[in-house]
Amino acid sequence: MAGIVKPQSGFVITPHKVSICILLQVYAPSGQLSVPFPFASISQHNRLGLFLIALTKSCDDILEPTLDEFLKLLKEFGGLLDNWLSDHVTTRLSSLSSPDDLFTFFSELRGILAGPETSIIDDDQINLDPNSNLGMYLRRCLLAFNILSFEGMCHLMTNIKTYCKEASSPYEMSHLDDASNDPEAPLEYENMDLENIVLQNFTQELESRKRSAGRVPFHNHSSKALFSLVEDITVSPGQKVKHNHRSQTQTHSPSVESSDVVLQRTNWQIQGYLSEQADMIEKLGSSFPMSAFESVLKVLQKVAPELHRVHFLRYLNSLYHDDYPAALENLHRYFDYSAGMEGSDFVPPLSFVNNGRYEIALLSLGMAHFHFGHPEVALKVLTEAVRVCQMHSDDTCLAYTLTAICNLLSEVGISNITGIMGASDSHVSTSLSVQQQLFVLLRRSLKRADSLKLKRLVASNQLAMAKFDLKHVQRPLLSFGPKASVQLRTCPANVCKNLRLSSQLIHQFDNESSIVTVDGALSTSWLKNQEKPTTTLVFPQESGSERNCDTFYSWLQSSSVPGSVLQLVGSSYLVRATSWELFGSAFLARSNALLFATCFADSSSSADLALAYGKLIQHVAVYKGYQEAFVALRIAEAKFLSVSKSGILTVKLQLLHERALHRGHLKLAQQTCDELGVLASSVAGVDIELKTEASLRRARTLLAANQFSQAASVAHSLFCKCYKFNMHVENATVLLFLAEIHKRSGNGVLGIPYALASLSFCESFNLDLLRAAATLTLAELWLLLGPRHAKRALNLIHSAFPIILGQGGLELQSRAHIAEAKCYLSDSSISVSEDPDIVLDSLRQACEGLEALEYHEMAAEAYYLMAIVLDKSGQMEQREKAAACFKQHITALKNPIKPKDPLVNLL
Amino acid sequence: MGVSKETCRNELRTAIRHLTDRCLFAASKWAAEQLVGIEQDPAKYPPSHTRLQRDCSSIRRRFRSTDEITATPVAGTSYVSTPVPEEESEDVDSDFYLLAKMYFNCREYRRAAHVLSDQTGMKALFLRCYALYLAGEKRKEEETIELEGPLGKSDAVNSELVSIERDLAAVRKNGSIDPFGLYLYGLVLKAKGNENLARTVLVESVNTYPWNWSAWLELQSLCTTIDTLNSLKLNNHWMKDFFLACTYHELRMHNESLAKYDYLQATFGCSNYIKAQIAKAQYSLREFELVEAIFEELLRIDPYRIDDMDMYSNVLYAKECFSGLSYLAHQVFMTDKYRPESCCIIGNYYSLKGLHEKSVMYFRRALKLDKKYLSAWTLMGHEYVEMKNTPAAVDAYRRAVDINPCDYRAWYGLGQAYEMMGMPYYALHYFKKSVFLQPGDSRLWIAMAHCYETDQLRMLEEAIKCYRRAANCNDREAIALHKLAKLHSELGQSQEAAFYYKKDLERMEDEEREGPNMVEALMFLAKYCRAQKRFEEAEVYCTRLLDYNGPEKETAKSLLQDIKLAQSGFP
């Protein structure tokens, strides 16, 4: 933490310290017997001693407790003695009425210290060892008093007076003027309890937000994993580790905090508080209470104008609330004041280096622009950061910057970046495509991070690498010369390897925990624990102590892995889930998402969590139907403070759209789909995944309305866009969809090439499930060409069956069953009337699945087929049943009943 | 002028009496200055009477011919005549009041307040509160120094504010408050951060008693935007013109401000205050010659003046006038060395001498005397830039900006510092801020354009836009035109390039400057006209090029031959 606080200009004596001294005097009156006057037993005496030790640990305060708070604290410890002790303190304090009284008081204090020559003469006598904790404290106080000028003494006098007065009379005014001359909210900053203020306002804000919970979907970008990186360097590694320890003590929701902070006042603690809040902002994103925290920061700034970290917090706060001008202003202000030196351990202190580390400012600015969705500007700024890093040979920052650029490139669609990386990549010819440049950059930054031993960065680079491998085919980088024969396929093994490597990180932090435990933080937590009702760690005979020990140790244990590491490891599981989703193992995807949601929910950002929940909910919807998915959604929604700003909203819209399509509510489908599109930023290249999804859904809606040419044109332009931004995985889907359009329009011949193209994409990207779907579509297309091709179609379907039945969702399975049945029906070599069960079985399964999905159109088809088969085989009773079902679905499709679901009210 | 000089004079005389009686010294000083500033009719008074007023119009005579700023005559403004309030019967409380006043004069504020503690009457109440206020202020200043902690904690407050506010609010409520009480009430409210109420209270005060300049000044500091200014409901009084002129200046509406002052000078022809204010406005418009002349005259009339002299030193600095600056520094040093302005002037002097460490020391001293002394922070930033200590410079500039976010010089300094560190893109943020605040200053535009033009960015289109702005706003050094021409030719837009080269050429001819730029312009134009087949023009340029030595001469010769050939080819 060097460099934040100017070297302690002194241990300043304050009224609070005077009252501690009074207690010290009570604890160790000079020349008394073993159990001095007010104490009844030794244990009582020891108890006071322990209390005093805890108090002395939290000195160096910015803000100290008022007398009231102090007395309250004393009461909790004092037991029977409390009245006597607090009376004693107050009377003693009020008896100090002239500077000379102070003088005598301190010379009396000197008497309780045992001189060096008085070796233990009498065992019974209590003397304070000058080298003990309390003795040192007393000596510091004495020294501080002795060097006090007369002015200082006068100040101490007036301070003691106000200190006593505040306790006896209720507040008249706080001497800190509220700058925001707002008469309705007079905050009593002086006895403020930072977190309580936050909390109060927080709940207020939350309520008001609930009231005004509009249908306005909020725009939210996500790049939090990156942000943890910035934090990593602006806050030094060591410190980061430290505050993460502290954040462990907090549970996910801030509401747990309400009861337990009184003494969060030391410099260390304020720093810790700020870091903690930074974590919270990051985690909660835009649902963090903005204005409340802002007012706390304003107070802090007033009390400690040289504590520049406050500006950084203000920056973070406005960043996550999408307040662009304020964020920029505060970012610049922070770095102007701190020169990037604040809080960094790995540079020599300010006096040695003259030129500051403004490259960090550039890095942060770049990230901010990235967050706000200005990729072009962000890239410019980051390029400048690279240059400045190289100029000042700041390798660490360079590594981070390169990683940031990688993330930017991989997340934002950029079709052309010639010369962006300029000097940094002079050896890479600009003829390479964006993807190739990204690949080179990724490898370089991975190597750099590795050589600098930045473990977290290595892990996050490996993660980025895995993401890259997931979606890109390896190509030779050489544009001339002999080319090694390269298989044009993605390499799942590489993805797995990188993912595994990145989650290795967690082991490397196992054994570092003991070093970073900070004394200040420890004592705070101890004090916190003390305040809990049944607490006294010190006296094992009393009840409840065991529990207390437990909480204490569990605190120690839980903090063994820093939060940023957990976050990284967590996101590696998310990437795992995504990769399995693509590779076609729905169940592995689900289990990874589940693992993330259970193990990393506390340490990850709310956006990540929303993503994981989204995956799980989608899974439920695809495999169990909508009813259950909506139940799950409701559970998930309860975990987020504001749904409208989180990723859950996207999931909700997706579900609603899907269901509306299945039920045939095309108007509703159109509406939800438009809502989804609005969530994305309007800047080209930003939010690209959301945009592709929205337009794919639009095309699907059009198809459902039988607007074939329009659907095809939307799909076509989508294909062009994906091609431009090198999104081949999405291309496979789009191609398959084009095939689907032709299938629906009855134009089998035109559809087949699309299906084949999609198949080949799927093969080179190892998209197994999608491949099965494509095979199915291909089979259906063949079937469309006439009964001659039924055999071929059947073969295709059977080849895809293992994956479809193993991993496919209800819809896919049902479709496969229906297609199979159709094949059998059109195959003249098989007589259905003789062996109806081969068809009926699959049709029955199809019907079950489609019922769950409420997919009226296909269900009607299935029942229709079933009725025909039953008719042929002469099972009249069952035929009637099937026919009735058919009719039911048809009518449901023709006149869609208004959905009663409350979720729809959202729209 | 709506009111006669004599009326003004009488009003001011009474006002001075009132103000002095209430120990509002700054305001009465100001009023007295204006009183003497009203031009006397020389026929009526003997010369000794106008000693302080001689040559007061020499400047106007000197500069009137060159730049005629016609004072927009405020046609048909009808001034309301504010009745001069009758004094309370003075002998009731006069003995105690006199004693309190004397204590006050000896700066024993608390004593003064104590003497008046039992006295009734608005005048006594005012003096008591005012004395308490000043005592609190004094204590606050002392505490600020005593309490400075490791994190710069200095939350010293005037502890008397609460009680004063309570008393005055009560009096205001029962309606017996006088304008002076209102002024003090406004002061207290402002210190407590209740700006809206402070504004209304101060407006009340100046409407009932317009001659208290301190009240106007407080009101001015609360008018940070033109909208707030326009929303004030002020009576028309000639004091309002002073106020408006001053506020316009603070809102960077320099021409409006100058017009007001010109208008006021018709009555207050010899007012030093107005002269200094005009100098201030002209300084912002960068009319250094005029400013220097004004200050020379001011010093002649009032040689021990320190107010505003830091600006004079800036002008001298800009003109690199070593001896003048040293003379000024010496003079202010002898007059009062512990004035922030004095320290600032000395700092400027050392800076001009290139002794930056010493200069920083004096700026620091100035800042110690006045922590919110804006120009000292900025100037200190400049010094640190000179010393290549960019982090310190950035820090200093940032403090200036945080004190007054409208200080375009500090924003510019920040930009420069970052550009020096090789972060042009980052610097752009600051340059943007500075041009936003001072869009008429070509230097800022040029600096910004330069930033865009750097090797790292090469954003030439943006650079061109900036240079164009610079060229449009009176670019003295004529950098912009040349740069524009060059950039356009670099981008292959030869038509635009030719246009700007031509303009640059015209300008150089106008100012009779020669140099490489001239050769470059001629060369380009010759080639361009040749390519455009405008042979005659091309010939003219080539012949002019023949006057210069060097390789260009040869090129010109061959071009001429070329042209002749081409002309003969197409008769």
Image (spheres, coloured by chain):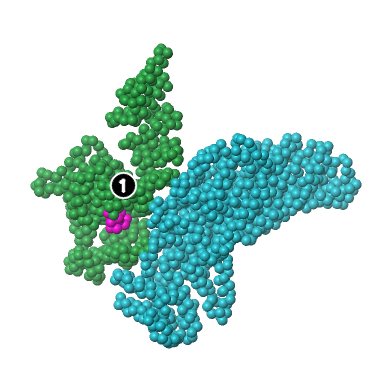
Chain colours: A cyan, B green
Q: Position of residue B512 (x, y in %)?
A: 28, 29
Tell me if residue A463 comes above or below residue A380 in the rendering. Answer: below
Q: Chain of mark 1?
A: B
Q: Is residue B509 left or right of residue A176?
A: left
Q: Position of residue B27 (x, y in %)?
A: 23, 56
Q: Secondary structure at mark 1?
A: helix
- Magenta stretch: includes residue A451: no
**How many C-alpha atoms fall within 10 Å of the one at disc 1: few (<14), some, or many (≥20)?**
many
Residue at point 40%, 15% (across, down): B565
Tell me if residue A724 comes above or below residue A169 in the rendering. Answer: above
Residue at point 40%, 21% (across, down): B530
Q: Position of residue A46 (x, y in %)?
A: 48, 81
Q: Is residue A381 left or right of residue B113?
A: right
Q: Is residue B372 left or right of residue B63?
A: right
Residue at point 32%, 36% (across, down): B477
Quadrant occupied by the N terminus of chain A: bottom left
- Magenta stretch: includes residue B368: yes
Q: Is residue B310 visible?
A: no
Q: Give the magenta range.
A: B362-375
Q: Position of residue B274 (x, y in %)?
A: 23, 47
Front residue of A763/A696: it is A763
Tell me if residue A817 comes above or below residue B478 in the rendering. Answer: below
What residue does disc 1 label? B248
Residue at point 33%, 47% (across, down): B386
Amino acid under disc 1 = Tyr
